Image (cartoon, rainbow, N blue to C red):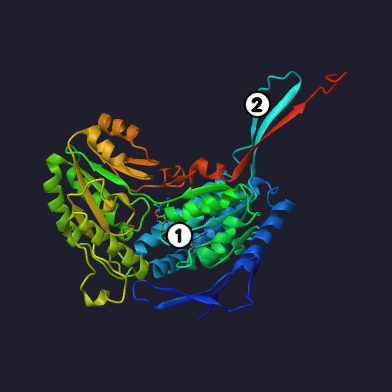
Amino acid sequence: MNVKRMFINGEWIQPQTEQTRDIINPFNQEVIAKATEGNQTIVREAIQAARIAFDTGDWRNTPASERGKLLSKVASLIERDKEELAELETLDTGKTIVESRADMDDIAEVFRYYAGLADKDGGEIIDSPIPHSASKVVREPVGVCAQVTPWNYPLLQASWKIAPALAAGNTVVIKPSEITPLTTVKVTELIEEAGIPNGVFNLVLGSGETVGQELADNHQVDLISFTGGIHTGKKIMKSAADTMKNIALELGGKNPNIVFADADLETALDQALNAAYFHAGQVCSAGARLILEDKIHDQFVSELVERVKNIKLGNGFDEITQSGPMISAEHRRKVEGYVELGKQEGATLRTGGKRPDSPELQNGFFYEPTIFTDCTTDMRIVQEEVFGPVLTVERFTTKEEAIQLANDSIYGLAGGIWTEDTLKANQVAAELRMGTVWINDFHPYFAQAPWGGYKQSGIGRELGKSGLEEYTEVKHIFQNTKPEPINWFN
Ligand SMILES: NC(=O)c1ccc[n+]([C@@H]2O[C@H](COP(=O)([O-])OP(=O)(O)OC[C@H]3O[C@@H](n4cnc5c(N)ncnc54)[C@H](O)[C@@H]3O)[C@@H](O)[C@H]2O)c1
Ligand SMILES: C[N+](C)(C)CC=O
């Protein structure tokens, strides 16, 4: 089996020790690849390569339009190899091939968007209050950017970091999740094929504790951009503080989905399923907290339970599969622990709550889509991110109560509102403390609009113009156009 390697300073590295990690297909537990396991020494080499490539200045002084052309080329190569990339993503994560193809379309779009944005900010002339002077503000790349990504959307989350970082003229060391490195390795090949100069883009592989931690600690890194869980995010923030690195954190969520009685209930029902169970609920913005107006609660829940029972679990490559497995045995155990906790806390289990019985699913890490009702905000099952196919249902009577319930969370990533009353929708949207609010929809994100969290869902924004600005420092250049002595000390 060929071993996936690290890419440092323009070369695929043959490691001195052949320590590798098995990459597992979560649908059947087969080993689909082996990946080199990095160590502190190799990460330091990658950082050093990125440091030199940044400091020599060739990449950051390349016209932004040229950097944009390289990103466009990467987008075209992703489109060329879309099917191969999608298949790797499905093998690695278990998500359906339909989802993986959609991810690849989004990823190519992200590279194209930042290719187009790369040369659009030429700086700003400031009206200086000082006579005989000129004042301008420019944006410059931050420097060496470390990027650490999760397993649920491996290449999508990587693209949100790679494309803007390179567009802005930074150099990069990226570490994908050790569980799902395959598409990031493949896209590194495409970035190489597009002609990236040596040292500008580097890939390291291995565990968070060793490889990721070194990226957070190392004094030669200027910025660390992380997408992952809240506990890792806090750890990285503490580590980054020692060298005062810039940080960008995209963390978890426990996202409310509020349905008012005056909503189009058929659409709200259909989309509540999508909100909660898409990719087996392993989505940062999953609508895992359904908040229903009292008047419709019972009817809505009983219809939802029927539909949830029909969700077709299976092999992501099977076109009729609607939802794949959990990513790992360990993660499924965590989900199971939360379901037990929900029962102990007094929530009512309405459906699911166990592994499926079907013989063809026994080798995969499957878990049945689950619904709990009679939930209250003091329950951990309502407050903590389960990151699996588990939906909790709460109820409200007034708009104010819905807002209060939705905001009662340490998280603030995203939320949905369902109502035909646009004034009410906008009043509620204005009160929700979240980075994204969807009205009569759930889940859309695209390259042009910023993405990120309030509160403990993170710091900073990806995508949109803000996603490029994350990778820049702002510099003010002031020029005295009539220099003469000021005689202060005479
Ligand atoms: N806000 C968003 O846009 C967004 C998107 C996707 C996923 N997520 C979140 O990601 C989480 C699921 O992903 P996960 O389980 O891979 O998260 P995780 O925090 O376990 O791991 C994420 C990455 O961090 C690395 N890591 C672990 N310990 C580290 C350390 N000490 N130093 C540096 N790196 C370290 C891991 O190896 C992995 O590459 C969920 O909480 C989900 O909500 C958020
Ligand atoms: C940001 N998103 C929705 C693509 C993936 C979250 O897990």
Quarter of the C terminus within the rendering: top right
Q: Residues within 10 Å of mark 2 (few under 14, many from 20)?
A: few
Q: Nearer the viewer, residue 475 or 433?
A: 433
Question: Is the residue at mark 2 in contact range of ligand 1, meaning its CB lies under 8 Å from it?
Answer: no
Write down the quadrant of residue 51 in the picture: bottom right
Q: Looking at the picture, how far across and down is residue 171, in whole percent?
A: 64, 54
Q: Position of residue 381 (x, y in %)?
A: 27, 53
Tag 2 secondary structure = strand
Q: Could you tell me how many numbered marks the image carries?
A: 2
Kindly indicate whether the residue at mark 1 contacts the one at mark 2 (C-beta within 8 angstroms): no
Question: What's the residue at 59%, 69% (across, down)?
Answer: 39
411 shown above or below 338? above
Residue assigned mark 1: 150
- Amino acid type of the residue tagged 2 in the rendering: Ile
Q: Position of residue 418 (x, y in %)?
A: 24, 40
Q: Is ligand 1 within 8 Å of the beta carbon of the residue shown at mark 1?
A: yes
The label shown at residue 126 is: 2
Residue at left 55%, top 54%?
Answer: 162
State whether residue 203 is above or below residue 426. Answer: below
Q: CA distance from mark 2 to mark 1?
A: 41 Å
Task: Check the image and report above or below for 149 versus 414.
Answer: below
Relative side of 107 to 331, left or right: right
Closer-to-camera residue (456/298): 456
Determine which quarter of the picture holds residue 276: bottom left
Q: Is residue 58 visible to the viewer in this orientation of the structure?
A: no
Residue type for callout 1: Pro
Secondary structure beneath label 1: loop
Give the number of the disc on residue 111: none
The local crowd at label 1, few if under 14, some if 14 to 19, many if 20 or more residues have their Cα within 10 Å, is many
